[in-house]
Amino acid sequence: MTLPLVSIAIPAYRHARYIETCLASVCAQTYPELELVLIDDGSPDDTFEVAKRFLDAHRDRFRRIVLERHENRGVSANSNACIEACSGEWVHLLGSDDRLYPEKVAHIQAAITEWNLPDLALVHTDTDTIDADENPHTSRHKARHAPPGPDHAAYRWLFHRNLISNPSIALRRDAFITSGGFDPTLPLEDIDCWLRLSTRYAIARVPEVLASYRKHPGNSLRQRQKMLGAFFATYAKFLEANPGLIPDKELQRHFRWYLHRFWRRIRKQAPENLPAYIGALLKSYVRSPQASDYRHFGEILLKNTG
C-alpha cells in the first residue's frame, strides 16, 4: 500500500545555529513519504546557506524539496507561504529552531487513519523543552494537556489556555487555508488560528512526547509583555467573530484573570492606568466584558512594550 505524502513546512529565520539539528530530526523520521518546504524569511545570518548545504546532501530522503529565500515578511506571512507551497494533505509546521522525535509523523498519521474524521483539521502531541545547547529544560510548572483524542469544541479550553505546542502540530492543509491561515496583523498568530479552526473543525491530541520546543534568548515567547498584549488582541478578535460562544460567567472570570496579569506587567512603567484597571475590574462583576474591553488593555500593553 502506498502511503500518502506528508509535508514538513519550515518557515526559517535567523537560526543558523539550530537549522541543521532541526533538519536532521526531519530526515530521521520513520515515516518514509515526505516532502520538505523551507522558506528563509530574509535571515541576516547564514541560515539559508546552512540549510542548503544540508539538503543538498540529503535530497534522496524526500520525494520533493522546495527551498527558497524571500525578503523578510514576518513569521505569519512566511508560515502561510510555506503551507501554501506544500502538496501533502497534512502539513507538519516546524520552527527552524525546534526538533522532532523520529516517530512524530508516523504516529500522527496512524492516529489520523484510526480516527477517520473528515472534519479533523489539527493534530497535536506533547512536547518537551530543550535549551540552546540541546540540554533538557526543566520548568517549575507542571505541564498541562488537552484531553486525548479528537475534540469538536476545543475552543472551550483553547480560549482559557493554549495547550498546543507549535512543534507538535500537523495541519490539514485545505482547512488551514480555508480558515484564512495565520493573521499577519496579530503579534501572536498561532492561538488566533487554532481558535478559528476549533469553531469549525475537530482538533485532536496524541498523548505522546514527539517534539522538542527550544527555549533560547531569541524566542518571541520570552517577550512576555508583548505576548500578553497579543493575547488581549486575539481574544478581542475571537469574541467579535463568535458572540455568545463563551458563557458569561466564564468570560468574566477570564477577563479578570487577564486584568490581573495586565496590572502586574504595567504598574511600574505606566501607573496612570490604575483607574482604568480598577474600573474594568469592578464592572466585570456586573456585566460581561466586550471585545472592545480586551482590545483596550491589549493596546496599552503593546504601546508600552520596549
Image (spheres, helix red, strand yellow):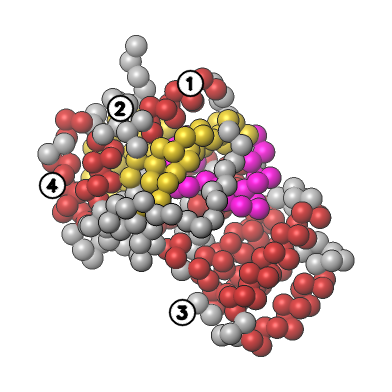
Badge 2 or badge 4: first in the primary sequence: 2
Q: Which mark is residue 113?
A: 1
**Image height check: is 6 above or below 250?**
above
Q: CA distance from mark 1 to mark 4?
A: 35 Å
Task: Read off the magenta span.
Answer: 152-176
Q: CA distance from mark 1 to mark 2?
A: 17 Å
Badge 1 or badge 2: first in the primary sequence: 2
Residue 224: x %, y % from top left:
50, 68
**Depth check: 157 or 302 in front?**
157
Q: Which residue is mark 4?
A: 53
Point out the image quarter for the N terminus: top left
The three-letter amino acid code for the residue at tag 1 is Thr
| Label 1 crowd (10 A; few <14 / some 14-19 / many >=20) | few
The residue depicted at 56 percent of the width and 25 percent of the height is 118
Q: Which residue is mark 2?
A: 30
User: Is residue 57 something one can see in this rendering?
Assistant: yes
Which residue reaches farthest top? 1
Q: Which residue is mark 3?
A: 306
**Label 1 residue SS:** helix
- Give the side of residue 35 with respect to residue 260, left or right: left
Q: Is residue 156 magenta?
A: yes
Q: CA distance from mark 2 to mark 4?
A: 22 Å
Residue 187: x %, y % from top left:
49, 63
Badge 1 or badge 4: first in the primary sequence: 4
Count up the numbered dots.
4
Residue 44: x %, y % from top left:
23, 65
Q: CA distance from mark 2 to mark 3?
A: 44 Å
